[in-house]
């Protein structure tokens, strides 16, 4: 028997709350702003290095290669910063997925008028119903996408890319 509307609404609210919590954790512990700043620095360096190599400017290339160790350290930081957030988010997800959801919604069953893929070891079996875990995952995934779009589009300040000062080339 399909779950009633109140149960579905409660599950959706739980998934939305989980998405907001994980977004906040990733924004603070994962230092997303710092990661974006590092990414801009690395991209500017790579662009400048590529341009110097394309123009066969060996002096500029050597000068830029001196910064290589610094850039590698920045790239390492860029990779490790989000891992801090994942060390918090993954246990929260597994606790919710394995313990909280089945306890709060033991008889949850949602009959759909369409089919959705259910990855059975990537064989992608299609089903026209969802259990509590599937409904949670789909809802949290869609909510996370919407949250990311809304925050990045309307709440984050647009930052201008830091361009290195243009240096005239010698003839």
Image (tube, rainbow, N blue to C red):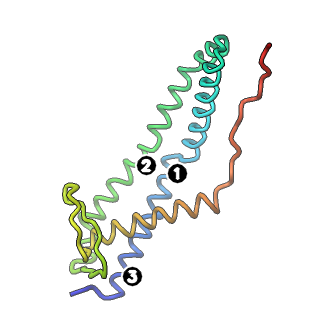
Does the residue at mark 2 contact the one at mark 1 (Cβ under 8 Å)? Answer: yes
**On screen, 58 above or below 28?**
above
SS assignment at label 1: helix
Task: Give SS at disc 2.
Answer: helix
- First of labels 1, 3 by sequence position: 3
For label 1, count other residues whose C-alpha is less than 10 Å away and answer few (under 14), some (14-19) or many (20+): some
At horizontal 53% and vertical 46% (from top left) the residue drawn is 31
Tell me, for residue 80, which label it has, or none.
none
Residue 86 location (% of width, % of height): 39, 49
Residue that carries the numbered disc 1 in the rendered image: 28
For the residue carrying disc 3, how many other residues have a C-alpha within 10 Å: few (<14), some (14-19), or many (20+)? Answer: few
Specify which label sits upstream in the sequence, 2 or 1.
1
Q: Residue at x 32, y 54 (%)?
A: 91
Q: Which residue is mark 2?
A: 85
Front residue (pair 102, 156): 156
Quadrant of res 45: top right
For label 3, the residue is: 9
From the viewer's perspective, is residue 107 above or below residue 27? below
> Whole-Å distance between the Cαs marked 2 and 1?
8 Å
Q: Residue 126 location in percent, x, y?
A: 23, 69
């Amino acid at each position: 028997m399909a779950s009633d509307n109140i149960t579905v609404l409660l599950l959706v609210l739980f998934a939305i709350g989980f998405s907001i919590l994980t977004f906040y954790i990733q924004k603070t512990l994962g230092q997303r702003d710092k990661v974006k700043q590092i990414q801009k620095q690395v991209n500017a360096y790579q662009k400048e290095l590529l341009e110097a190599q394309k123009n066969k400017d060996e002096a500029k290339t050597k000068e830029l290669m001196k910064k290589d160790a610094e850039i590698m350290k920045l790239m390492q930081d860029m990779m490790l910063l989000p891992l801090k957030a994942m060390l918090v988010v993954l246990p929260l997800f597994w606790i919710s997925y394995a313990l909280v959801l089945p306890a709060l919604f033991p008889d949850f069953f949602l009959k759909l008028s369409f089919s959705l893929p259910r990855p059975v070891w990537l064989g992608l079996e299609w089903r026209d119903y969802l259990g509590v875990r599937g409904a949670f995952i789909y809802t949290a995934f869609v909510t996370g996408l919407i949250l990311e779009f809304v925050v990045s589009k309307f709440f984050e300040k647009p930052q201008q890319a830091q361009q290195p000062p243009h240096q005239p080339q010698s003839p």
